[in-house]
Amino acid sequence: MGRKYRVCIIGFGHMHINEVGLSYHENPDTEIVGIADTKPEIPELRAAPYTREWNFAHAKEIYPAAKAYDDYVEMLENEKPDLAVVTCEVRYHREVVTKCAKAGVDVCVEKPLSYNLQDALAMSREVNEHGTTMLVNWPVVWSAPSREMQRLAAEGAIGRVFQMRLRIGHSGPLGMGAKHAGVTETAAPMTGYERAQTWWHRESMGGGAMLDYCCYGCLLAHWFIGQDAEAVMGMKANLNSEWGDADDSAALIVRFPSAMATLEGAWAMFNQGLPGGPVLYGTDGTMLQTGDGIKIIKADGTERVAGVPPLPEGRASIAAEYAHHKSTGQPPYLLVEKDYNMRVMATLDAGLRSAKSGKMETVDSVHWSIG
């Protein structure tokens, strides 16, 4: 491609940075030149695998050529990167994206896009005004089975999709036995009070299972059903993490014009009890992911398992997708593109509002039409 895109990392509160950072580090068209954390609302009590201090120290070891900064604004000024990878607390996404846009730096924000729709609107306005690019990274986008499942559904393999169900969860981001991609370590045992001092378990910082997990459901439901959501009923609770104030259990029921989706997320369980992926129900059958591929069960009782082709060469990671988009001028993959994620965020925001109001809330689909 003739050049390497300069990448800085802003924020180490999200343990996804361990995998996302490797994507940019290992890609031949990108290089990590600077790393900096955001300032936590309150200090964490200990450095254990996947805490922000541990993530930052790990990055220093893996990317020794990248300069470590105490202030990410200074880093932007000194390094003049092409892209900032934003993996800080969700509540800080708006602040960080705004400063990057004003500095003329593209951003790739780790899911979910923002704390609420209001923040997402502000972020979109900033990048539009300054002519920069904003992508949203979702680990599920780089799942070949998910892409093949969507292709089959769009082709009508089970007729018209009228319902989707997704249940995902674990013992919590820092819970017992938690293991996240990008490193070999598992989470160390932490007391409830120690976990409560992390942003994950603080509602004010964007912690909680609804933002963390139901966002995946909102993305996939839009994608598989192929319609814009109209209304959402949401519920969230803290059922087994009483030492924190963020929800550890959440559920959304999303209404589409001719379909519905049931989306569950939890940080307080040790087995999902359901297939590890979305289940689609159509007028002619049912579809789900298995270890062998995509299982299709037809209404007449016949079954088949469809194989899964690999992701496109040169576009199989977020780093490769960014480099491809910038070097060719072609649009980024739909699910990481800004405006598509505004639709997803509008749906998630309706769920967040519903969980507070106790009523079904309509999806604000007019106010985010901002060009």
Image (tube, rainbow, N blue to C red):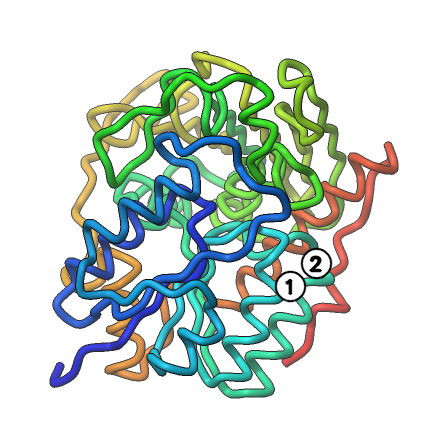
Place residue 194 in its image quadrant: top right
Of residues 193 and 245, the one nearer the viewer is 193
Above or below: residue 151 compared with residue 190: below
Which amino acid lies under the numbered mark 2 shown in the image of this protein?
Leu
Of residues 299 and 305, the one nearer the viewer is 305
**Circle 2 residues within 10 Å: few <14, some 14–19, many ≥20:** many
Q: Is residue 335 in view from this perspective?
A: no
Q: Secondary structure at mark 2?
A: helix
Q: Is residue 310 in view from this perspective?
A: yes
CB atoms at circles 2 and 1 under 8 Å apart? Answer: yes
**Circle 1 residues within 10 Å: few <14, some 14–19, many ≥20:** many
Residue indicated by mark 1: 120
**Residue at the spot 33% in from the left edge and 27% down from the top edge:** 179
**Residue at the spot 61% in from the left edge and 70% down from the top edge:** 123
Horizontal arrangement in the rendering, residue 292 relative to residue 200 (left or right): left
Q: Position of residue 78 (x, y in %)?
A: 37, 81
Image quarter of the N terminus: bottom left
Q: Position of residue 273 (x, y in %)?
A: 45, 12
Q: Position of residue 21 (x, y in %)?
A: 28, 54
Which amino acid lies under the numbered mark 1 shown in the image of this protein?
Ala
Above or below: residue 328 compared with residue 257: below
Horizontal arrangement in the rendering, residue 145 relative to residue 120 (left or right): left
Residue indicated by mark 2: 117
